[in-house]
Amino acid sequence: MPPPSVIAIDGPGASGKTTVGRILARKLGYRFIDTGEMYRALTWLALKEGIDLSDEGRLARLAAGTTIEIACHDGTGYNPVLVDGVDVTSAIRSSQVEAAVSAVSRVPRVRQALVAQQRALAEPGRVIVAGRDIGTVVLPQADLKVFLLASAEERARRRYEEQTGGKRQDYGAILAGLRRRDQIDSQRSLSPLRPAEDARVIDTEGLSPEQVANLILGLIGEG
Ligand code: DC
């Protein structure tokens, strides 16, 4: 049997979706789409333009009028994120963007605009798509849905260790930020973070990204 063509990976921040998704893309020869990059890129632009984050109308117009290019990559090499042609790959990982992204991503018309782009990107198949609502809303027909879990403490530790150079955030600040985002992402009325009914839930506590990827490959008979 061929492996599933569309694989959705959902889960909270720092649960390993991106790292695992890249490993799978490389092993299967699929494209990888990290939808969190889109919400982050739009948030970066909103902050740059000084938009009031409670102004839903302006955020919606910004989403509709902005071209966000994310690399649909194969898990290798440099994969830039471009907003209207500007490379924002590292800027979208800043603590300012982290703190504001949940406010932007809960706006219904922002989601509508980005979900349409995500569906179009996934259309050709042989793709892994990571996010919060991929299995429930964006691609409910996905052939395989995976939901990754890990405690907030473990996720904060992973984020802490991932940081390289520059200004580092301390562990406590990362943990508090993740908890805040978890709460907003899972309590918003539109597309809240939750596993699809037919998702395979994987507890990643104590597992490396390679081990999680191997578990998923095992599920699809490619392990
Ligand atoms: O996965 P991430 O940390 O890069 O996601 C950044 C934010 O984007 C997260 O706080 C919630 C939002 N997001 C979303 O609402 N829906 C998605 N499909 C992906 C991300």
Image (tube, grey):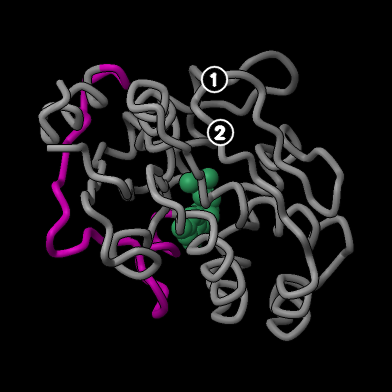
Quadrant where the C terminus is found in the figure: top left
Location of residue 169 by image quarter: top right
- Residue, x 71% and y 34% (percent of image)? 80
Q: Residue at x 14, y 35 (%)?
A: 220
Q: Is residue 200 magenta?
A: yes
Give the magenta part as a residue range: 182-210
Looking at the picture, does residue 177 appear above or below residue 140?
Answer: above
Task: Report the label total.
Answer: 2
At mark 1, the secondary structure is: loop
Q: Residue at x 26, y 41 (%)?
A: 148
Q: Is residue 85 left or right of residue 175?
A: right
Instruction: Confirm if mark 1 falls within 8 A of ligand 1.
Output: no
Question: Do callouts 2 and 1 mark residues in contact (Cβ within 8 Å)?
Answer: yes
The location of residue 42, given as percent across then percent down, is 71, 59
Residue 204: which quarter of the image? Answer: top left
- Compared with 50, 176 (above or below) is above
Look at the picture and state if 108 lies above or below 1. below
Which amino acid lies under the numbered mark 1 shown in the image of this protein? Answer: Thr
Front-most of residues 32 and 196: 32
Some atom of ligand 1 lies within 8 Å of the CB belonging to the residue at label 2 = no
Report the front residue among 177 and 142.
142
Q: Which residue is mark 1?
A: 76
**Which quarter of the rendering shows the N terminus?**
top left
Q: In the picture, residue 189 is in which quadrant?
A: bottom left
* Residue to which mark 2 is pinned: 73
* Residue 220 visible in the picture: yes
Secondary structure under the numbered disc 2 in the rendered image: loop
